[in-house]
Structures are given as C-alpha cells and as structure tokens.
Amino acid sequence: MKTILSAALVLGLCGLAGAQGEKADPVGTWKCEYEIGGQKRMSTLTIKKDGDKLAGTMSWPDQKETKLKDVKLKEGDLTFSAVRVFMDNKIPVEYKLTITGDKLKGKGAVETGGEKREFDIEGKREKKDK
C-alpha cells in the first residue's frame, strides 16, 4: 500500500513540475474584456511571431487595428503598449498580462493628468478552426 501511495505522489509531483515548466505561448488571437468607469468593454489582441521577435495588433469596436509597441514575453508575462485614439486624443496604454494556457489576465495602465490609472483585463484565446 505504501508503495502505491509513494508512486502516486511521485507521479503527481512530476506532473505538477512538468506543468510549471511549460512555456507560455502568446501567439494567437485573444478576445479581451475589461471595465472602465463601470462600463464593460472589449478588445481583440493578435500576437504573431516575427522571426525571433513578437509583434501584434490590438483593435476595439470603435478603433481599427493599431500596432503594438515593445512586445515582450518574460517568464509568462506579456508586456506591450498600444495607442488608443479617442475623440482626436491619442492615449498610450501599457499592458502587463500573465498567460496561463489559453487564458490571460493582467492590467492595463493609462496616465491622465499626471496620474496613473490601472484597470483589470482578462482574455481567452480563440480556438483555431481545424
């Protein structure tokens, strides 16, 4: 009985260690949701591999694709910035998102009037049609 328990424990720990060792893969199209001023909003994030670098775009219902800047992946955290255009105003938004499988979660930050304001953002990767 002890042998079976020991084997199960070892297999469980090996499986857990293997899951932690998986590299986060940001490539794909992500449907994101966030809330600002009590209003739910949506955006679409698309990340591609460009050689050994990451590149991408972000779009919103009222704004076509805008190119992402400084796209980086480090230890499962995806960081980048995008410029949001709102009524002739260009607003840079900094993002830091943690990728876990086909989900991402993190924060966006905007600086307005010398004050940094953050908002929570979550997203799911769209499944590829086979």
Image: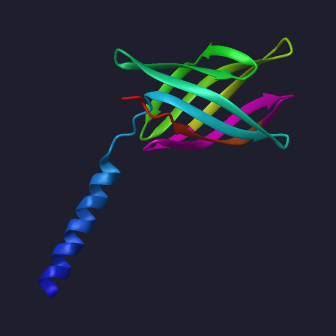
Residue 4: x and y, percent? Answer: 15, 80
Residues 107 and 62: in front is 62
Percent x, y for residue 55? 48, 18
Residue at 58 percent of width and 36 percent of height: 96
Tell me: residue 106, above or below residue 110.
below
The tally of labels here is 0
Q: Seen in the image, is 4 located left or right of residue 21?
A: left
Q: Give percent across and percent down for residue 11.
A: 21, 66
- For image coordinates 27% across by 53% down, the residue present is 18
In the rendered structure, which segment of residues is drawn in magenta?
97-116
Which quadrant of the figure has residue 119? top right
In the picture provided, is 96 more to the left or to the right than 7? right
Does residue 107 appear left or right of residue 23 in this picture? Answer: right
Nearest to the observer: residue 62 or residue 14: 62
- Which residue is located at x 34 percent, y 14 percent? 51
Q: Which residue lies at the image location 86% right of the left edge and 15% below the top edge?
A: 87
User: Which residue of the protein is positioned furthest toward the front in this rendering?
Assistant: 130
Seen in the picture, residue 69 relative to 109 is either above or below; the reply is: above
Residue 86 quadrant: top right
Name the image quarter holding residue 36.
top right
Q: Quadrant of the C terminus?
A: top left
Residue 109 sits inside the magenta stretch = yes
